[in-house]
C-alpha cells in the first residue's frame, strides 16, 4: 500500500450480512405466516446472548461459527407476538425471539472481546455468547442475523412506552414498528450516527504515528481511536473535528471517509474516518472522559497485533476500530 492512503481492506465484522431484509418481505403477513413452518428462529436472552455449538467455542474453532437456531414450529403454529422477522436467506425465513438459557445452566469461561474472559451459560451442547465479544467469530450470515436481532431487541426494550403520551406500546410489522395503545402513534427503529476517527500524523500518505486514547473506566493498557455521537445540525466532518478537539485538544485536517459498521449497543452506526494532525501539537485529554491520549508508533501497533506488546491492548475483532487500526498498521507511510 506504499504511496496511497490506507483503506479498510476488510469488511468490519458486524457489517457482514447475507440475508435479504427488504421491507416488502416483512410487510406481507400472508407470506410470512405461510412460510413460518419452514422458518428458523434465533433465541436472544435479556443480555443479548444467543446459543452456538459449544464445541466451536471451547476450544475456539478456527472456522467461522454458526448460530444454533430452532425450528419455528417448536414455538407454535404462528409467529408469536414477541417474534421479530430478520430476513430471508437461501429460501429460508429467519426470526428472533426472546428466550433465556435454563436457570440451572452451568457456565464455562471463554475469551471475549479485548481478550477479556467471560462466563457463558452452557446447556444441551450449546454456549450462549454475545455479539460484542464474539461477533467476529460468527459466519457472515450469523453475524448479520445477530446484529439485526440485537438492534431490534435494544430498540424494543427502550421503546416500551410512547414518547408522545407515555402510553404502553405494542409491536407491529413483525417487530419493525410499534404503536401506542393510547394515542395510536407509530414508531420505527432508530439508529444514532456516531463518528470514529483514526488520526495519524502528517508524514507522507499514512503517517508514522497514530493518536490513541483510553477512557478511565477501561481496563489498564486498553487504548483505541477516538469516537463520538453526531449532534443535531452537525455534519459528519464537523463532528470529527469537534470530537477530536474536545477529547484530545488537537485540530485535525484531511478528513476522509473509510467505511461503516452497525453497533447496536444500544443503537448506533459507527462511521469510520481518517484524519491528520500535527504530532508536535500538545494534547489536552478531556477531563473526566479521556484518561490519557498519546501518539503511538506504527511498530508498536504492529507488535500489539502480533501479541508482542503487552503494554498496548487494542480494540476487539468485532469493532470497526480494530479493522481501522489493523489497516493503518499494515500500510506504509
Image: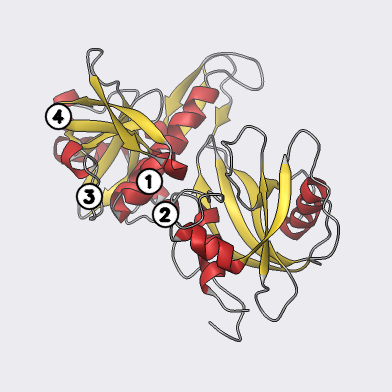
Q: Are marks 3 and 2 in contact (CB under 8 Å)?
A: no
Mark whose residue sits in front, 3 or 2? 3
- CA–CA distance in space, label 4 to label 3: 30 Å
In the image, residue 88 lies at what x, y percent?
A: 28, 49
In the image, residue 64 lies at what x, y percent?
A: 25, 53
Q: Are marks 2 and 1 in contact (CB under 8 Å)?
A: yes
- CA–CA distance in space, label 3 to label 2: 17 Å
For residue 76, say whether it is visible. Answer: no
| Above or below: residue 154 compared with residue 180 | below
Which label's residue is closer to the chain start, 4 or 2?
A: 2
- CA–CA distance in space, label 4 to label 2: 31 Å
- Taking the image as shown, residue 18 lies to the left or right of residue 218, namely left
Q: Are marks 4 and 3 in contact (CB under 8 Å)?
A: no
Which residue lies under the disc numbered 1? 135
Which residue lies under the disc numbered 4? 73
- CA–CA distance in space, label 1 to label 4: 27 Å
| Label 2 residue SS | helix
Q: Are marks 3 and 1 in contact (CB under 8 Å)?
A: no
The circle drawn on residue 13 is: 2
Mark whose residue sits in front, 1 or 4? 1
**How is colour applied across the structure in the image?**
secondary structure
For residue 328, say whether it is visible. Answer: yes
In the image, residue 69 lies at what x, y percent?
A: 21, 37
Image point (53%, 34%), residue name: 266
The circle drawn on residue 61 is: 3
Image quarter hosting the C terminus: bottom right
Amino acid at each position: 500500500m506504499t504511496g496511497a492512503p490506507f483503506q479498510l481492506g476488510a469488511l468490519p465484522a458486524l457489517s457482514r450480512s447475507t440475508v435479504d431484509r427488504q421491507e416488502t418481505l416483512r410487510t406481507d403477513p400472508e407470506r410470512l405466516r405461510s412460510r413460518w413452518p419452514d422458518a428458523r428462529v434465533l433465541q436472544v436472552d435479556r443480555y443479548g446472548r444467543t446459543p452456538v455449538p459449544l464445541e466451536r467455542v471451547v476450544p475456539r474453532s478456527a472456522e467461522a461459527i454458526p448460530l444454533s437456531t430452532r425450528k419455528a414450529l417448536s414455538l407454535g403454529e404462528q409467529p408469536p407476538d414477541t417474534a421479530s422477522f430478520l430476513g430471508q436467506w437461501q429460501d429460508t425465513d429467519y426470526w428472533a425471539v426472546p428466550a433465556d438459557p435454563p436457570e440451572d445452566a452451568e457456565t464455562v469461561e471463554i475469551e471475549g472481546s479485548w481478550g477479556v474472559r467471560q462466563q457463558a451459560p452452557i446447556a444441551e451442547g450449546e454456549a450462549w455468547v454475545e455479539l460484542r465479544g464474539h461477533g467476529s467469530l460468527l459466519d457472515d450470515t450469523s453475524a448479520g442475523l445477530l446484529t439485526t436481532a440485537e438492534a431490534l431487541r435494544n430498540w424494543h426494550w427502550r421503546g416500551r412506552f410512547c414518547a408522545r403520551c407515555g402510553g404502553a406500546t405494542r409491536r407491529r410489522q413483525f417487530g419493525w414498528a410499534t404503536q401506542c395503545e393510547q394515542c395510536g402513534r407509530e414508531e420505527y427503529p432508530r439508529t444514532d450516527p456516531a463518528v470514529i476517527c483514526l488520526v495519524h500524523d502528517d508524514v507522507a500518505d499514512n503517517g508514522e504515528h497514530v493518536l490513541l486514547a483510553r477512557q478511565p473506566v477501561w481496563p489498564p493498557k486498553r487504548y483505541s481511536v477516538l469516537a463520538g455521537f453526531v449532534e443535531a445540525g452537525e455534519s459528519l466532518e464537523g463532528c470529527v473535528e469537534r470530537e477530536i478537539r474536545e477529547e484530545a485538544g488537537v485540530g485535525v485536517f484531511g478528513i476522509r471517509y473509510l467505511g461503516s459498521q452497525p453497533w447496536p449497543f444500544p443503537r448506533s452506526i459507527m462511521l469510520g474516518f481518517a484524519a491528520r494532525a500535527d504530532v508536535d501539537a500538545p494534547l489536552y485529554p478531556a477531563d473526566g472522559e479521556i484518561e490519557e491520549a498519546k501518539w503511538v508508533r506504527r511498530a508498536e501497533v504492529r507488535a500489539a497485533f502480533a501479541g508482542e506488546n503487552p503494554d498496548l491492548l487494542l480494540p476487539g475483532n468485532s469493532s470497526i476500530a480494530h479493522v481501522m487500526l489493523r489497516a493503518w498498521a499494515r500500510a506504509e507511510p
